[in-house]
Image: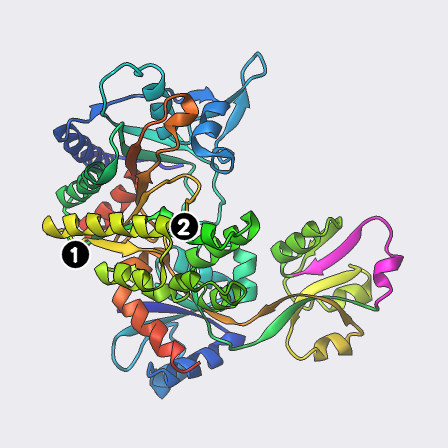
Amino acid sequence: MITIAIAKGRMQDSALSLLSRAGIRLSEEAVNSRRLALTDETGQYRFIFVKPADVPVYVEHGIADCGVVGRDVLLESEADLLLPLDLGIARCRIVVAAGNAEAMTRVQGMIRVATKYSQIATAHFGSRGIPVEIIQLSGSVELAPALGLADMIVDLVETGRTLRENGLTVIEEIAESTGRLVVNRASYQLKAGEVARLVNALKAII
Amino acid sequence: MRYYIGAEARLRRMVEDVAMSVFEGWNYEEVITPSVDYYDLFEQGMGQREAQRGFRFTDNDGRLLALRPDVTSSVARMAATLLSERARPLRFCYAAPVFRQQTQSHAEWRRENTQLGCELIGAGGKPADLEVLRLAAEILSRLNLQSRYCITINNVEIFNGVAAQINLETPAREQLRRLIDTREADELQRFLTNYGNGETRAFAQPTELTGKRNVIQAARRTITNDRSVAALDSLDELWTEIEALGLEDSFEIDLGDVSSLDYYTGLSLKVFVHGAGSSVGRGGRYDGLTGSFGRAEPAVGFVLNLDALTEVLGRKATQD
């Protein structure tokens, strides 16, 4: 049996429907229950549902053999995992956004950047040699520029609606993010057959 | 930071004793190297990037010291200097803690790990490679991990030959290496379309890089440059010996193991055990190492992580 960690929230429904198209199904009753660990109909797969940022943690320690999680989370965690498949689900972009395009030119000295993704933001500005102060928030990041907490934000954008409604525009795209299948390094060797079966079943339907 | 108390400490001692007695059975002499040495030694021995993970501090004359981040550097220097006159091959083994800075969140978070290791210096070719593989397998089966472990083998020259043939610049080579290492199939396909050469296609399907002899046969269909073919041949011969010993169920070929290309020069190996989330051992051939201490000669060895093995065996004991 192999254990698959699924990121709760945005990713969960599209991940489960993808898996079910690949023949790995959870019963209706199981999905609707509030249990956080479930076994599929064939008994070959166990699912655990955890917060997105915890998926790389469970998989890196080998508690889960595989995981489904967004690339944004992986970039932020820097966990040492195998990434054999881009599932193409929950597509979105990681962008730099600000009140208006001139915001950059008005800023003197230090730019303040509010974000949930401090690693990604640090790496992005660092690689351009732009000194920034990173302000770590855990949600509603779009508020920060309007209230004067930050000059710009680094955040995930799906449709851009939230940005627009808060008077922000995209200045730059840092990366695209989609749901990924991640695999633990030891499981990849020790459960090679089972992992390959899962990878191939998913590859066939993407 | 980890304490071992009572039964755990006994178990850990038992694992250490098993490994050391297997080494001794193969005529490996125990060596105890200094815990503190000049940082230069480790930079020469491990390369800058790895050595920088060591804890560094200064002596009272301002020279940079380090708490040893590995034992191999010291053994290689010892062989090239103190023991330069001694008859080859040299066989050494050790059980010694090494110290490395770790990224806190990673699975390998311990700053201090005890390595059970061996080095076979002054012997090249298949017999020497096979000797260390047999040693590793014997230790693991003596620990009752039979059919619970897997040793993956590769020859780094297969990748190096392909990369050299398409004249990859260092950043592009590093990118290709990383994509193979993390098995990013889609990015790999995209990367490889920029390099029309047919040979790189051997790496395009990450799931097909691991397996038994079939992996070598598949690679031969696309790879034709001399350097890689020679490496495939030697891996093939090694596999024949592994089969002759009846060990093929415990071994696996992994052409995608390209994690330490700058260090190893031929065979590379990793050890995985059920119950441990990351590899519990690694090793390979490093013919370039002793040369940097003034006497170039072939060398091969491996280390097992005593703390990781103890943890797996401890958990196994409570489950059984």
Q: Chain of mark 2?
A: B
| Residue B3 in the image: above or below residue A169 | above
Q: Position of residue B229 (x, y in %)?
A: 32, 52
Indicate the quadrant where residue B127 lies: top left
Q: Nearer the viewer, mark 2 or mark 1?
A: 2
| Residue B40 in the image: above or below residue B179 | above
Report the residue marked by disc 1.
Answer: B249
Q: Is residue A107 magenta?
A: yes
Circle 1: is it few (<14), some (14-19), or many (20+) Cα within 10 Å? Answer: some
| Residue B63 in the image: above or below residue B252 | above
Circle 2: is it few (<14), some (14-19), or many (20+) Cα within 10 Å? Answer: many
Where the C terminus of chain B falls, by quadrant?
bottom left
Q: Is residue B274 visible?
A: no
Residue occupying the far right of the picture: A106
Q: Residue at x 32, y 34 (%)?
A: B114
Q: Nearer the viewer, residue B92 or A15?
A: B92
Residue at disc 2, secondary structure = helix
Where the N terminus of chain B falls, by quadrant?
top left
- The residue stretch that appears in magenta: A101-115
Q: Is residue A14 magenta?
A: no
| Number of numbered markers | 2
Q: Nearer the viewer, residue A63 or B280?
A: B280
Residue occupying the far top of the picture: B61
Indicate the quadrant where residue A155 lies: bottom right
Q: Residue at x 80, y 74 (%)?
A: A167
Q: Position of residue A40 (x, y in %)?
A: 30, 79
Tell me the colour scheme of the image.
rainbow
- Three-letter residue code for mark 2: Gly
| Residue B168 in the image: above or below residue A147 | above
Q: Which mark is residue B161?
A: 2
